[in-house]
Amino acid sequence: MKRHIVLIAILFYAAFAQAQEVFVNADFVSSYIWRGIDSGNASVQPSLGLNWKGLTVYAWGSTEFREKNNEIDLSLEYEYKNLTLYFNNYFTQTEDEPFKYFNYSSHSTGHTFEIGVGYMFSEKFPLSISWYTTFAGNDYRENGKRAWSSYCELSYPFNVKDVNLSIEAGFTPWESFYSNKFNVVNVGLSATKELKITSNFSLPIFGKLIANPYEEQVYFVFGITL
């Protein structure tokens, strides 16, 4: 697993040296819901990355205001026409666990490693379908076998006046981290709007209404992007 981290670090360095665009921002969210799963309370979620010839390399994190739950992710995305490839290294640590980022022991590490692929049909019909599968890290069933946790999502963006909207639906195909069998785990509607503060400054705000039919839960998330 350490080789994955070294490889990502090298790619970060090489891409930063020739970056076309470097970005840094942060979201402040009322709760952290990920793929229909409650993953934390009110949090700040910063990101730092760059774009270079279709390649996006970035670090993303989430830290709760109230507790000590943390997440640090390193990701690569490569976009070619309507196809996007993904590689994600997720690291999570709860308040009950020591922070051991460089622990890569399979059954005790806080890391999981995921690959994915996404495809958007066209600009006129911007329906996207994405598939992600965990291939390494702490991802096991109760019987000790690797779970190969997988998630598939369809999403469709659209606009109503000056509000950007998106509907999404996601499912897991088999027993894994997300569910004990095939289940729809995420159905959501999100809205983003630029809130004009002054003539020269606008603040992006967003809201998400999310349902997890498998867990019989509904969430509403509000956020601000800086």
Image: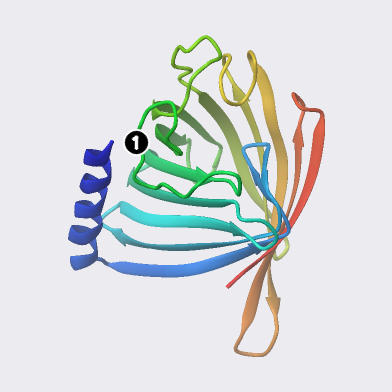
Q: Label 1 amino acid?
A: Tyr
- At which x and y percent is residue 54? 30, 52
Residue 117, quarter of picture: top left
The residue closer to the viewer here, 21 or 177, is 177
Left or right side of 159 for 154: left
Left or right side of 139 for 76: left
Residue sitting at x 33%, y 54%: 57
Residue 67, quarter of picture: bottom right
Quadrant of the snapshot with the C terminus:
bottom right
Quadrant of the snapshot with the N terminus:
top left
- At which x and y percent is residue 12? 25, 57
- At which x and y percent is residue 140? 48, 20
| Residue 18 shows in the view | no
Disc 1: which residue: 104
Left or right side of 191 for 226: left
As helix, strand or loop, the secondary structure at mark 1 comes to: loop
- At which x and y percent is residue 13? 21, 60
Q: Residue furthest bottom?
A: 199
| Residue 7 shows in the view | yes
In this view, 17 is above or below 131: below
The residue closer to the viewer here, 37 or 170, is 37
Q: How many marks?
A: 1
Residue sitting at x 67%, y 37%: 37
